[in-house]
Each structure stands twice: as C-alpha cells, then as structure tokens.
C-alpha cells in the first residue's frame, strides 16, 4: 500500500510540474495560460500511463539490456533462482547489459514482472559469492516492491529533463531573446524539481534496507560488503556510457560517479557507511 501511495504521489507531482510549466509558457508566449496548462496536463497524463506500464521496458532499452535464457548463462540463472526461493518471490527474468561498468539493477511493475539485469563488467569483476550478494540486494528491492517506484521516478525525472531541454533549445534558437531570464527560470526550476523528486521518492534508507535484506537472504553480509567495495572503485574506473543520471537510482552503485549531474541526482548513501553497516551485522 505504501508503495502504491508513493507511486500515486509521483504521478500527482508530475502533473503539477507540467501544469506549472504549461501555465508559465502560455504567459511567456502571450497565449492563453489555461489552454497551454491543459495541453501540458494531457502530456503529463500520457507520461503517467507510459511510466506505469512501460517504464521498465524503456529502462532496459536505454541500457541495451538483453533478456537471456538459462542455457546462455546457467550460473547466473542458478543464483537468481536460489535467491528467489530464499526471498519467497517468483524468479525474475535475467538480462545482460553490454557495458564494462560493473553494476546491476532490478526493474518491473511488480515481482511477477520483475527483471534483474547485470552488466558484463560485474560478471568479470566479482566472485560467485560477491555476485550472489549483489543479486540478493536487487532481489530485496523486488521483495520490498521498490522497483515500480524507482522505475517510475526515473522515467518522470527523465520526462522533466526532456521538457527542460526543449525549453532550453527554444530559448537559444527560437528567435525570442527578450525576457530570457523568465524562460531560463521555467527551464531551471523544473529540472531542479525533477532532481529533488527522485531524491524524495528514492530514499537512501531503501539502499540500507536492501543491503540488509539481501545479506539475510544469502546469510553472508561480508560477501555483499566486499562486492560494494569492488563496485565502488570499478565504477570510478569505468563509468556508464549509456542512459543518464535520472536513472542512476536503479543501480546498486551510482554508475555516473564524479559528474555534477550524478551528484545532483544522488540517491545512494555514502559507500563507506553501507559497507560498515553490513560488516556490523552478526549471526547471518
């Protein structure tokens, strides 16, 4: 129920943001503000429908993730099946992302439609036990029903960013330079709100909870702690070249470390605190 309320809150926030942008643009360009506000409300409604039903597919496509069958990577499917049984959820589909960035994420509307994706980089970097820790973390997100909220938040932030880029383009190439500060504010404020939206929707406490729950699934918090340590440095050496910061919250480790936008959209707690919390766990 809480997950559904958060999702509804995201949808409502998107509509308010787009309506405000429409009213501002209508006023700026001398058209009827109510008319442009209604147009933007319709656009927001379309984005809401798309985000709910197809956001997972857009995320998989953005990172060129390919669903694989059991015979293509038996070990990976075996690990996912083992953790799914421990977590008490249906076995999700498994996907591979063609990237040297060592990372993983889960997506889908619910546990029955979940997909767990790993990059080629993480398969090369981690041992079997460390990989189990990472996959257990992602399965914890599936179990806790975080995946819909995370996916919708990423899609909405991307939508706001897309609209902001359109406004930026119009400001510089639309032939109207007068009162450009007003249009600048119309672009900048929604972008900032979009970043804050992701931060509010994807609380850092979720990552701590997924770390702990995943460690309990496999009875090995140290394996996940070692994996996070490797991933932290691996992401700095091989940052993600696909997608964008708006979807960084989906990953177990921020794949865009070091950039200004990565900091603005940061939804991950400090790595040293995550590792310390795992190593303080006992009797698992």
Image (cartoon, helix red, strand yellow):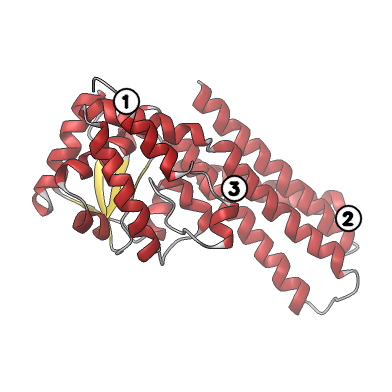
Q: Nearer the viewer, residue 282 or 39?
A: 282
Q: Is residue 27 left or right of residue 250?
A: right
Give the label, 1 or 2, closer to the camera: 1
Q: Is residue 224 left or right of residue 155?
A: left
3D distance between C-alphas at marks 3 and 1: 45 Å
Write down the quadrant of residue 111 in the picture: top left
Is label 2 in a helix, a strand or a loop? loop
Write down the quadrant of residue 182 in the picture: bottom right
Callout 3: few (<14), some (14-19), or many (20+) C-alpha neighbours within 10 Å?
few
Judging by the rendered image, the residue that carries numbered circle 1 is 281
Give the label, 3 or 1, closer to the camera: 1
Tell me which numbered mark, 3 or 1, is placed earlier along the sequence: 3
Q: Position of residue 143 (x, y in %)?
A: 34, 28
Q: Nearer the viewer, residue 49 or 154?
A: 154
Q: Is residue 177 above or below residue 122?
A: below
Q: Are marks 3 and 1 in contact (CB under 8 Å)?
A: no
The answer to whether residue 75 of the structure is visible from this angle is yes
The answer to whether residue 238 of the structure is visible from this angle is no
Judging by the rendered image, the residue that carries numbered circle 2 is 32
Query: Which residue occupies 44% across, 38% down?
Result: 273
């Amino acid at each position: 129920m809480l997950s559904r309320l958060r999702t509804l809150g995201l949808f409502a926030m998107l509509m308010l943001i787009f309506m405000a942008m429409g009213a501002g643009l209508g006023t700026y360009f001398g058209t009827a503000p109510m008319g442009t506000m209604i147009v933007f409300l319709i656009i927001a409604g379309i984005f809401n429908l798309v985000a709910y039903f197809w956001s997972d597919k857009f995320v998989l496509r953005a990172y060129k993730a390919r669903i694989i069958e059991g015979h293509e990577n038996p070990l990976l499917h075996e690990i996912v099946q083992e953790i799914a049984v421990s977590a008490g959820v249906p076995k999700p589909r498994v996907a591979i992302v063609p990237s040297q960035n060592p990372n993983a994420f889960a997506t889908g509307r619910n546990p029955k439609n979940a997909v767990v994706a790993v990059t080629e980089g993480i398969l090369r970097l981690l041992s079997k036990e460390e990989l189990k820790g990472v996959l257990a973390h992602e399965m914890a997100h599936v179990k806790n029903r975080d995946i819909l909220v995370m996916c919708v938040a990423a899609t909405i932030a991307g939508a706001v960013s897309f609209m902001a880029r359109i406004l930026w383009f119009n400001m510089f190439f639309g032939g109207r330079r007068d009162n450009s500060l007003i249009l600048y504010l119309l672009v900048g404020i929604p972008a900032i709100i979009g970043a804050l939206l992701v931060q509010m929707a994807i609380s850092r406490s979720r990552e701590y909870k997924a770390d702990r729950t995943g460690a309990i699934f496999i009875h090995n918090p140290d394996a996940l702690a070692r994996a996070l340590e490797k991933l932290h440095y691996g992401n700095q050496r091989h940052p993600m070249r696909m997608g964008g910061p708006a979807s960084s919250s989906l990953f177990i480790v921020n794949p865009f470390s070091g950039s200004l936008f990565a900091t603005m959209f940061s939804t991950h707690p400090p790595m040293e605190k995550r590792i310390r919390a795992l190593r303080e766990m006992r009797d698992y």
